[in-house]
Image: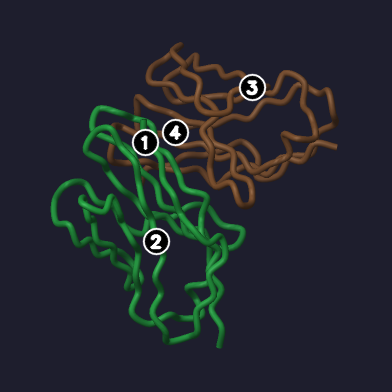
Chain colours: A green, B brown
Amino acid sequence: AQSVTQLGSHVSVSEGALVLLRCNYSSSVPPYLFWYVQYPNQGLQLLLKYTSAATLVKGINGFEAEFKKSETSFHLTKPSAHMSDAAEYFCAVSGWGNNRLAFGKGNQVVVIP
Amino acid sequence: DVKVTQSSRYLVKRTGEKVFLECVQDMDHENMFWYRQDPGLGLRLIYFSYDVKMKEKGDIPEGYSVSREKKERFSLILESASTNQTSMYLCASSPGTSLWFFGPGTRLTVL
């Protein structure tokens, strides 16, 4: 079975500052890892995913995440926050041979001008 | 583009009503899923299906059932809606383990 832990339901970041959202996972098989973003009143949009290729994954809108097997982590970063980054972010995990996608509880990001 | 469509964006029902939420995908995917999304709880898997007429319980199946008579359509059924089923419901489809496509969601309110 797979599971995801995202700490800190609400995250405040100043405009221009680093965005760091933490994700730790548990998986009994090699994992596939995902970050999704949900803007207000919109559906889920895939930001990036790790599928066992490069451990540093670049996504849309300047976001990237690094897979660290030893730490069972897949933290999401963006060097400089923009007002348009205000949204809810979800980390998710599935695994080889397992077609279930398990989500974390999400981080609501607020960008302070 | 893969499309996952859900029959309604907003739905208001009364306690005790039978409610059908419909989901259709147009890419011949084997797997389809129903999630509910609640503030602070993320997305939780209700049911999924890996083939026509096949279904498996997810993490929170109580109070729900599903139907998959055709490959492209996956229905979520609330046999007797209750106020604690007020939520956002998201459908997804997937061809395998590394790609998911989500519908726009149905916001259900049970009065």
Disc 1 residue type (three-letter) = Gln
Q: Residue furthest top?
A: B53
Residue at point 54% right, 75% down?
A: A12
Residue under numbered circle 2: A22
Residue under numbered circle 4: B25
Residue at point 73% right, 39% down?
A: B86
**Labels 4 and 1 positioned on one and the same chain:** no
| Local secondary structure at mark 3 | loop
**Chain label for disc 3:** B
Task: Single out the mark in the foreground, 3 or 4.
Answer: 3
Q: Are marks 4 and 2 in contact (CB under 8 Å)?
A: no
Residue at point 61% right, 58% down?
A: A41
Task: Single out the mark in the foreground, 3 or 2.
Answer: 2
Disc 3 residue type (three-letter) = Glu
Q: CA distance from mark 1 to mark 2?
A: 17 Å
**Chain label for disc 4:** B
Disc 4 residue type (three-letter) = Gln
Query: Which residue is more in the foreground, A101 or B68?
Result: A101
Residue B59: where, in percent of width, then height?
52, 28
Q: Are marks 1 and 2 in contact (CB under 8 Å)?
A: no
Residue under numbered circle 1: A2
Residue at point 44% right, 49% down?
A: A5
Q: CA distance from mark 3 to mark 2?
A: 31 Å
| Local secondary structure at mark 2 | loop
The reply, left or right, for residue A71 in relation to residue B50 is left
N-terminal-most mark, 3 or 4: 4
Residue under numbered circle 3: B62
* Residue A27 vertical placement versus A45 (above, below): above
